[in-house]
Image (cartoon, rainbow, N blue to C red):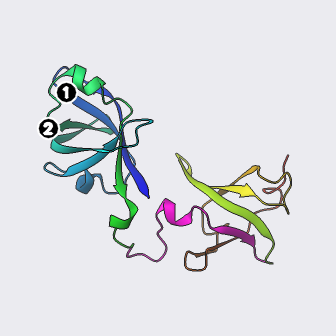
Amino acid sequence: MELVVGRVAKSHGVRGELVVEVRTDEPELRFAPGSVLKGKLPRAKQTQQFEVESVREHSGRLLLRLDGIADRTAADALRGLLFVVDTADLPPSEDPDEYYDHELEGLRVELGDGTVVGTVNEVLHSAAGELLSIKAGDAFPPAGREILVPFVLAMVPTVSVADGLIVIDPPEGLLDPE
């Protein structure tokens, strides 16, 4: 499975620099000069490899120069490119309370009494924090609707990747369809 660690937003200047939206906690490692990145254009099945020549921060984003991308035209051709890593290549987290998004996706979500709420569809990252996007099960009609639960300890007291289970304790009304 591939995990997105960055996205090319646009070109910058005339010398082939790329503006990259970072989607990793370790940009200093992933985008270090000399590192090799796998990139995939939207709707492409194959990945390409790119070597990082230089990187610098600019207005909260990274400006990246890649080997072989020397002008604005070449940089513009990479707009929308997703930098990806294979999840099998990721080291296990050293903190038992930290999870990769892909580890949570697909886990069963229950209430403390065992009532099945649904399945984690994806983890959303917002300015206010992380949200679990849960696809509702039959117990919370209409089935298939999206339920958003803040991924905070007060509402998500139990996460067991090994058991494929997340237990939530939502406040009253959070699971109501209205």
Please name the residue shown 13% across and 50% down the image: 34
From the viewer's perspective, is 131 left or right of 47?
A: right
In the foreground, 146 or 149 = 146
Q: Position of residue 127 (x, y in %)?
A: 52, 45
Q: Secondary structure at mark 2?
A: loop
Please name the residue shown 55% across and 75% down the image: 161
Quarter of the rendering containing residue 163 = bottom right
Q: Nearer the viewer, mark 1 or mark 2?
A: 2
Residue 52 versus residue 99 in the image, above or below: above
The disc at residue 33 is none
Report which residue position mark 1 lands on.
16
Q: Count residues near mark 1 (Cα–Cα under 10 Å), then give few for <14, some for 14-19, many for 20+.
A: many
Please name the residue shown 36% across and 36% down the image: 81
Please name the residue shown 17% across and 31% down the image: 69
Residue 73 seen from this side:
yes
Residues at discs 1 and 2 in contact (Cβ within 8 Å): no
Report which residue position mark 2 lands on.
67
Residue 108 sits inside the magenta stretch: yes
Q: Position of residue 92 (x, y in %)?
A: 38, 73
From the viewer's perspective, is 19 left or right of 53?
A: right
| Amino acid tagged 1 | Gly
In the foreground, 128 or 83 = 83
Residue 125 sits inside the magenta stretch: no
Q: Position of residue 9 (x, y in %)?
A: 37, 31
Tell which circle, 1 or 2, labels the residue nearer the N-terminal end. Answer: 1
Q: Position of residue 158 (x, y in %)?
A: 63, 76
From the viewer's perspective, is 125 left or right of 64?
A: right
Read off the magenta span: 93-112
Residue 131 seen from this side:
no
Q: Which of the image's four quarters has the N terminus?
A: bottom left
| Amino acid tagged 2 | Asp
Q: CA distance from mark 1 to mark 2?
A: 10 Å
